[in-house]
Image (spheres, rainbow, N blue to C red):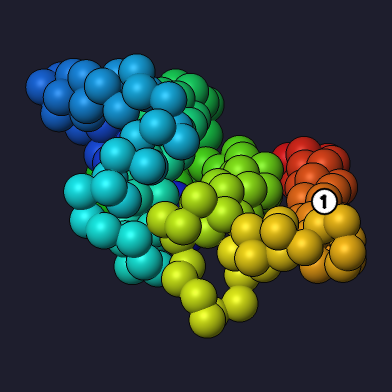
Amino acid sequence: VVLPRGVGRLLGSLAGLLGGGAETVVRRVVDVFTAFPFLVMVIAIIAILGPGLTSMYVALTLAGWSAYARIARGEILVIKKAEYVQAARALGFSNLRIMFRHILPNIVTPAIIFAMSDIVLVILSTTSLSFLGLGVQPPTPEWGSMIAEGRPFIMTAWWLVTLPGMAIVLVGLGLSLLGDGLADVLRTEE
């Protein structure tokens, strides 16, 4: 989640701050990446690069950055019109100071809230890819590969499949609840 968030936030921020041609180019590239289903794009990229952990990181970054770019660009477009930014411009502050002191710190909250739900998506994606044999390769332990390896023994040793599956569900539920609580806390501070 860190890599797509960083790439998306950088490109979305540049598009929102610069506007004009840069914004148009970033918006079109985001539209192209958004047009493809997430998991299909990840599988296609891994098929090109080959299975493994590094390929999975690259694929998840390339497929996931566009959502962060849209969030950053949208937030910046709203914040640029805020009264405190207009006041900073009227006081003669430089564009860099306005960007780093007034605009960028205020786009953090929506990106953090989205990142919490995106972590759940990444966990499900990595376990799905490992289950299919495209992600983390054995003997490295990973929930998806554990489920795949335990599948032939489901009738005699049900816990080989059930326990990793329950771990995925519990971690996903916990992160979702953490994200909701974090969203409530961050929104009340604004």
Q: Is residue 162 left or right of residue 23?
A: right
Residue in the picture at 50% in, 75% down: 138
Residue type marked 1:
Val
Location of residue 121 in the rendering, given as x and y in whole percent from the top left corner: 61, 44
Location of residue 17 in the rendering, given as x and y in whole percent from the top left corner: 28, 34
Above or below, comparing residue 20 to residue 142 in the picture: above
Q: Is residue 99 left or right of residue 82?
A: left
Residue in the picture at 71% in, 57% down: 151
Count of labels in the image = 1
Location of residue 11 in the rendering, given as x and y in whole percent from the top left corner: 28, 41
As helix, strand or loop, the secondary structure at mark 1 comes to helix
**Residue 117 figure quarter:** top right
Location of residue 57 in the rendering, given as x and y in whole percent from the top left corner: 38, 60
Residue labelled with disc 1: 169
Above or below, comparing residue 21 to residue 105 in the picture: above
Other-residue count near label 1 (Cα within 10 Å), few / some / many at <14 / 14–19 / ≥20: some
Q: Nearer the viewer, residue 114 or 63?
A: 63
Quadrant of the snapshot with the C terminus? top right
Q: Is residue 86 left or right of residue 49?
A: right
**Residue 154 figure quarter:** bottom right
Residue in the picture at 50% in, 50% down: 132
Residue 1 in sight in this render: no
Residue 59 in sight in this render: yes
Residue in the picture at 26% in, 21% down: 32
